[in-house]
Image: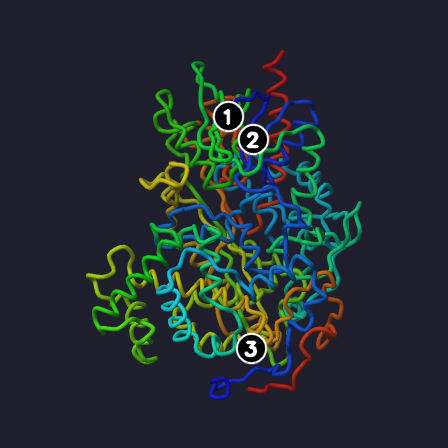
Amino acid sequence: MKDQHPKKTYYPTYDVMSEKGEWDPITQQVIQNRTHPTEGNVLTPEMKRTLQAYSKTLFPSHVGEQTLSISLILDHRLTENKLKSYPKNSLLSKEEIILYGLAHAEEECVLTDQKPFFQMSDDERLKKIISWKHQLGEESVWKNVSCDLFYTTLTSELLKLIYSDPSVWSNIGYGGPAYPRGYYAYGPKQFDSWEAKPHDENLS
Amino acid sequence: MTKTSHDVCIIGAGAAGSVIASHLSNKGLNVAMLDAGPHRDPQKDFASDELEMEKLFWDEPRISKGDDPIDLYRSTSGKGVGGSAVHYTAQLLRFHPNDFASADWPISYKDVNPFYEDMTKRLHLAGPSSFPWKEFGDRFPFPAHHDLSNNTLKFREGLEKMRVNHAVSPLAILSAPYDERHPCINRGFCEEGCMPDSKTTPLNTFIPEALQAGTTLIPEATAVKIETGDDRKAKSVHYILDDQLHVIEASIVVVAAYAVETPRLLLQSKNNDFPEGLANSSGLVGCYLMTNMNDHHIAKFPEEIRMYRGNPVQALTMDFYHKGFILNSYGMRPVRLASLFFENDASCVGENLRRRMLDYNHFTSFAMLGEVQPQKENRVELSGQKDRFEQPVPRVTFSHHDEDLSIRKQAKEMMEKVVRSAGGEPMYHLEAHAHLMGGCRMGDDAATSVVNSYGQTHDIENLFVAGAPTFVTAPAANPTLTVYSLAQRSAEYIESYFKSNRS
C-alpha cells in the first residue's frame, strides 16, 4: 500500500524510536505505554472490530504504516475517562458519541447489508462512512447520536492517535520528544545529529 | 463532611488565584485555595508528548453553541493547579493605553502600569533590549531568546522584506539561569507543560510562595456553591473532594475560575436572596463572553523548516495592532496541526491528510491574534443537563461580530503577504480561537457591570471575581500579563478591605 501511494516519505530510513534511550524516563514510559497498551474495559469486542475496520478504511496508508493498536489505545483512553469533554455543537460527551455511534454503525450495517461493518468490502465500508459524514445514515437507527457527529468526533480522536504514533513521526520526519537534550543546531539547514537527516531537495 | 474556617477562600489556583493567595498569605491572612485539578510536578507529571499532555486541558462537560462555537477544551482553559498558564506559549504583552480608553473600562493604563512593571520582574520576562512598541512592554529583566527556529527566521525575513517592524517576543521563559531553574533548551513543548521548568508559571512562582506563607491548597476539589448569610454576604464555599461534600467558611470569597466556571458558579449559587444568581442584579453575569481569534497560516517552503523545533512563539509584529491583530510565528507539533487541518477542512482525512502531513517539515506556521468585539449575546448560561456532581452543565453561546470577521480577513491577507515575501507558498488558512475573557465585566455602574475595577462584586461586598472574566474588551495582545497584573491590584485592595473590616 505504501508503494502505491502518490507521495512517499522524504525520510525512508529515519526511525525516531532509535533515539528513545535518550529521552527522559517519563516520556519513555508514556511512549512505551502507547506502543504496548494494556486492555481497557469499555469497548466490546464487536466495537473494537468496527473501530479497526473504520480506521483501516479511512486511513488506509496511515494504518498500513503505523504500529499502534488504535482500538486498544482508544479503549484505554475511554477507560481512563479521557474523553468526557463535549465536542462543539454537542450535548453529549465524546465518549457517549463514540460508544453510541459504534453500536449504531453496526446496527445499520446489519440492517442494510445483512453483515457487520468489519465484514463489508473496503468500498462498501467507505460508502457507509461517507454517508454518515453527510448525515445520510439510516434515520431509524441513529437515535442516540447523529451519524455526522459520530463521524467527526471519532475521526478527530483517530487523527490524534495516528499522529501520536512514533512510526508516523518517523514517516514525516518529526523529531519526537526532545527532552532532556533540546535543540542546539539552529539556523537554515542546521539540524541536530539525532534528527532526521536532511533529504535531497523536493523528492515529491 | 468537613467544615473549616479561613479569612479568605479562593476558588481556582491559576494565574489570578495564585497571585492573590500569595499576596494575602504573605500579609498574614489565613487563606484556603481550591482547584478542580491536581497539583502537578513538572519533573514527575509532565512529558514531551502532545497526547499525554492533553491532561492539562479542561475536560469537564461544556456545551458550546452559537454561529461560531468555541472549542472549550484545548486553548481556552486549563485544569490543575496553575490553570491555563501552565499550557500556554508565555508570550506576555501589555494591553495598549487605548484599549483601556475604549469601551467601558473603569481603569486606565496608568492604573495598571505599576502592576505591569511589577509582574514583568516577578515573571522574569525575557525580551529585546529595545522593544519597538514600548506601551506593550519594555525593560525586560532577562535578555531576548536568540536561538530562533527556522520557522521564526522565515517569519522575520518576510516582515523585514516588507519593511514591517518585528521583534523577538517577550516571553515568560527563562533565557538565562534563575535560582534553581535552567534556561530554555528549545524543546518545543511549551503548550504541553514545560517539563524542564524554564517557563515561568504559577507552579514555580506564586503557588510555592503562597504555600510557604501558609496558604492551604486543596487540589482536586470542585466548588459547587457559594452560600450567602442572613446579612446577604458570602458566607461559605461548598466543594466536593473524594466524592464528599465539604464546606469552607470565609470572610471573603474570591472566584478566580476563569471565564466559564466563574459565571457558572455564581449562577448555580442562586438562592432566595439572589434568585438570579449571585452578583447578578444587572443580569449580566455570564454575558459579554469574548475570545481571541488565533488563526494560523501554513505555508510551504522548498527547504526544510522543521517547525517543531524551539518554543512555538518566538517573534512578532505589533504594527497592525491598530487594525485589530498582531502576527507571530507559531510552530505546531503534528497532532495539533493534523487536528486543525481536519477541523478546517472536512476532506482532510486519510490520503488527503497524509499528503499534507508528508510535507510537515517544509511547512512554516504563522499566526494572528485578533481582537473580538464584546457582545452581550455571547454568554455563559446554565443548561438543563447535569454533570457528575449533579450540577448544571454550562452552555456557552458564541457568534462573531462582522468587525471580527473583517479583522480575520485582513490578518489572513497580511499573513499571505509575509509568506510570499519570505519566498514561501501560502497553502492553508486554519481558523482557531485562543483565550477566554469576559462574563463578569468590570465597571463603575452596577446596572451595566458585575464587579468594580478591583473585582469586588457590586451586589455582595465580600465576594470578588479575579482574572479574565472581569475584562471589558478582548484586545489583540495576549491577556495573561493583564490577568496577573490586575490580580495583584485586586489582592492589595482585598488586603485593605479585610483589614478595614476587621478593625
Q: Is residue B160 above or below residue B94?
A: below
Q: Name the side, left or right, on which A82 lies relative to A118.
A: right
Q: Amino acid at mark 1?
A: Leu
How far separated are the C-alphas under marks 1 and 3?
Answer: 53 Å
Q: Which of label 2 and label 1 is nearer to you?
A: 2
Question: Which residue does the image show at 59% across and 45% down from the upper left?
Answer: B480
Q: Amino acid at mark 2?
A: Ile
- The residue that label 3 is drawn on is B359
- Residue B313 can be seen in this image: no
> Can you give x and y, in whole percent of width and height, for residue A164 in the image?
55, 66
Query: Subunit of mark 1?
Result: B
Q: Are marks 2 and 3 on the same chain?
A: yes
Under tag 3, what secondary structure? Answer: loop
Question: Which residue does the image show at 71% across and 29% down from the upper left?
Answer: B213
How far separated are the C-alphas under marks 2 and 3?
Answer: 48 Å
In the image, farthest residue toward the top: B503
Question: Closer to the N terminus: mark 1 or mark 3?
Answer: 3
Q: Give the position of the C terminus of chain B as an image quadrant.
A: top right
Query: Subunit of mark 3?
Result: B
Which class describes the residues within 10 Å of circle 3: few (<14), some (14-19), or many (20+)? many
- The residue that label 2 is drawn on is B10
Q: Name the side, left or right, on which A11 lies relative to B456.
A: right
Q: Amino acid at mark 3?
A: Asp
Q: Which mark is residue B463?
A: 1
Q: Name the side, left or right, on which B300 lies relative to B277.
A: right
Q: Which mark is residue A81?
A: none
